[in-house]
Image (spheres, rainbow, N blue to C red):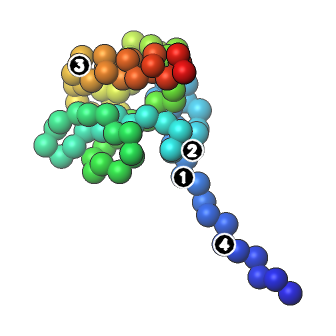
Amino acid sequence: MAIAGKVKKIPERRCVGCGNSFPKKDLIRVVREKDGKVSLDFTGKKAGRGAYLCRDTSCFRKARKAKRFESNLECTVPEEILDELAAELSAHETK
């Protein structure tokens, strides 16, 4: 009689643009660190409060327009970070 292996649970997070849940590794994380610095976290390992976004430019536009990054991170997100995120999404779409 074989013993069934442990099933590893895949963590899911909700996209701030569309509101759908995806596996955490498929999303881009914007993180606010304790010192208030906001940055992109492609590893998902940085300490701090995070907001997740799927790799769809329409979700990004929706989240940016509704200021969902600011409300989720509870701070103002610099334009440079949003521009960097937009560049990452456009580079992902061209692949």
Q: Earlier in the sequence, mark 4 or mark 2?
A: 4
Q: Amino acid at mark 2?
A: Pro
Indicate the amino acid at tag 1.
Answer: Pro
Q: Quadrant of residue 21?
A: top right
Is any atom of residue 67 visible in this view?
A: no
Which residue is disc 3 drawn over? 80
Question: Which mark sits nearer the N-terminus, 3 or 4?
Answer: 4
Marks 2 and 1 in Cβ contact (< 8 Å)? yes
Residue where numbered disc 4 is placed: 6
Image point (45%, 19%), residue name:
91
Residue 23 marker:
2
Label located before the other in sequence (2 or 3): 2
Eyeballing the image, is 56 above or below 6?
A: above
Could you tell me residue 13's position as x and y percent? 51, 42
Looking at the image, is 84 positioned above or below residue 12?
Answer: above
How much space separates mark 3 and mark 4, taking CA atoms?
43 Å
The Cα–Cα distance between marks 2 and 1, rounded to whole angstroms, is 6 Å
Query: Relative to residue 46, is residue 62 depicted above or below?
Result: above
Residue 23 in the figure: left or right of residue 49: right
Q: How many marks?
A: 4
Name the element at disc 2: strand
- Residue 11, labelled with which disc? 1
The numbered mark at residue 77 is none
Q: Nearer the viewer, mark 4 or mark 1?
A: 4
* Residue nearest the observer in this picture, 80 or 62: 80
Count residues near mark 4 (Cα–Cα under 10 Å), then give few for <14, some for 14-19, many for 20+: few
Going from N to C along the chain, the mark reached first, 2 or 1, is 1
Residue pictured at 31% horizontal, 16% vertical: 83
Farthest bottom residue? 1
The kind of residue on which mark 4 rests is Lys
